[in-house]
């Protein structure tokens, strides 16, 4: 992990008149110290490697489950072995380092932990610094883009496999299991998120979960999936045609594909994400259907969903170094759903697609023998 990352964090201390920052978000821990935690190992599981960065010290607080791992993964950090709750362990440490103003991640620290710490360390002002931390990971360095690219390449390979694999008569869950098996076999650290595999009218649920629903001829099959490589995520959606689908479904697929392409064509440094969202919405609206209810896209990196957000409600000006999804869709409840999603890296030469699977409709089929 580069010293520049820690230097950027320390600059925030001066900028916001803080003496230290306590880091609880897994992605920030990994970004700053190399310490790897699973998504389930959040702040609620105790001191699974909480970082405390003061003006002159880098401390990693870890309980016995994690001390060996922290020593291996985070060289250069002073390891503080802990055994009790935050309220017992942290106040003496704050006292010793003369911390009077402490930045914390309000979005991930539980309300109970926050309140307990406030009571146990009455002399310390606690400040939420979630927004202030966002710029640290907003622009990706070349090696980060490369890692996201490796995750995207595995996703493309997995998709090519699924196109051959899917058969009429399989369930959504069969496909979800196969894609996870394929990712792990090919070296992914794990899934980026629980995959979405939805057949027929169920594809109208933007975040539906795979079920025992059987894939039938004439269905669409929406697959939204991604993996993690070296901590970095991928996220891609394709909507397959199972056998012959109605003409209207083909038209909607064309509209989504054109909406996505129009948005991608408009990507440039200085453009606002809201403008891209509006471009995609206009193209879909021209089809006479309601555009998607979600945003057009989201940043991706050590987390699957992170800033920038490309949606109507948030103004993010795009910059070189941002990596984000572009994922318009059409959802007709009870009828069908179509989404196409790719990951774009905005580079000095312009936008570059990191996921490169075919975006024209692919027909899959065949019956389970
Ligand atoms: Zn997705
Ligand atoms: Zn996405």
Image (tube, rainbow, N blue to C red):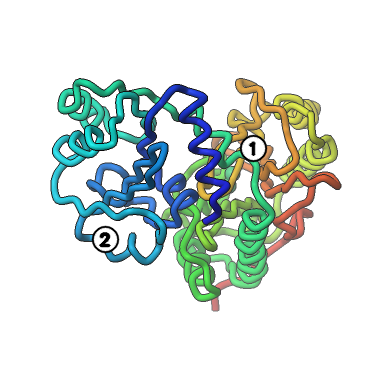
Task: Find residue 241 and report its image quarter.
Answer: bottom right
Q: Quick one: SS at disc 2?
A: helix
Badge 2: how crowded within 10 Å, few (<14), some, or many (20+)?
some
Residue found at the very far bottom of the displayed protein: 369
Residue drawn at x 63%, y 71% as measured from the top left: 161
The image position of residue 70, as x and y in percent, is 33, 60
Q: Is mark 1 within 8 Å of ligand 2?
A: yes
Q: Quick one: SS at disc 1?
A: strand
The foreground one among 103 and 349 is 103
Q: Is residue 286 visible?
A: yes
N-term mark: 1 or 2? 2
CA separation in Å, label 1 and label 2: 38 Å
Badge 1: how crowded within 10 Å, few (<14), some, or many (20+)?
many
Residue under label 1, please give it: 297
The image position of residue 127, as x and y in percent, is 37, 23
Residue under label 2, please give it: 67
Tag 1–tag 2 contact (CB < 8 Å): no
The foreground one among 276 and 299 is 299
The image position of residue 330, as x and y in percent, is 66, 36
Q: Nearer the viewer, mark 1 or mark 2?
A: 2
């Amino acid at each position: 992990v580069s010293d520049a990352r820690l230097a950027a964090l320390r600059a925030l201390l001066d900028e916001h008149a803080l003496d230290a920052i306590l880091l609880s978000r897994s992605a920030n821990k990994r970004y700053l110290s190399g310490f790897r935690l699973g998504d389930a190992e959040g702040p609620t599981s105790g001191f699974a490697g909480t970082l405390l960065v003061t003006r002159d010290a880098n401390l990693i607080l870890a309980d016995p489950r994690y001390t060996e791992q922290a020593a291996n993964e985070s060289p250069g950090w002073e390891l503080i072995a802990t055994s009790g709750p935050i309220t017992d362990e942290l106040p003496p440490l704050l006292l010793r380092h003369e911390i009077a103003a402490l930045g914390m991640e309000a979005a991930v620290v539980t309300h109970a932990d926050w309140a307990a710490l406030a009571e146990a360390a009455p002399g310390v002002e606690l400040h939420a610094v979630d927004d202030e931390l966002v710029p640290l990971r907003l622009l990706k360095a070349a090696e980060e883009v490369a890692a996201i690219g490796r995750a995207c390449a595995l996703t493309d390979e997995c998709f090519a496999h699924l196109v051959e694999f899917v058969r009429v008569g399989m369930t959504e869950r069969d496909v979800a299991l196969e894609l996870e098996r394929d990712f792990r076999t090919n070296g992914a650290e794990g899934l980026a998120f629980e995959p979405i595999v939805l057949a027929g009218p169920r594809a109208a649920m933007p975040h539906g979960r795979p079920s025992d629903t059987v894939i039938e001829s004439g269905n669409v099959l929406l697959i939204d999936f991604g993996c993690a490589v070296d901590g970095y995520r991928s996220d891609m959606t394709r909507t397959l045609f199972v056998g012959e689908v109605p003409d209207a479904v083909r038209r909607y697929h064309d509209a989504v594909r054109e909406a996505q392409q129009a948005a991608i064509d408009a990507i440039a440094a200085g453009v606002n994400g809201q403008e891209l969202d509006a471009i995609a919405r206009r193209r879909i609206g021209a089809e006479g259907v309601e555009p998607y209810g979600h945003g057009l896209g989201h940043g991706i990196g050590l987390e699957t969903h992170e800033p920038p957000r490309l949606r109507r409600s948030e103004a993010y000006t795009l910059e070189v170094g941002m990596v984000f999804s572009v994922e318009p869709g059409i959802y007709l409840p009870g009828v069908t759903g179509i989404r196409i999603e790719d990951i774009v890296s905005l580079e000095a030469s312009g936008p570059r697609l990191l996921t490169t699977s075919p975006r024209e409709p692919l027909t899959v089929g065949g019956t389970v023998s």
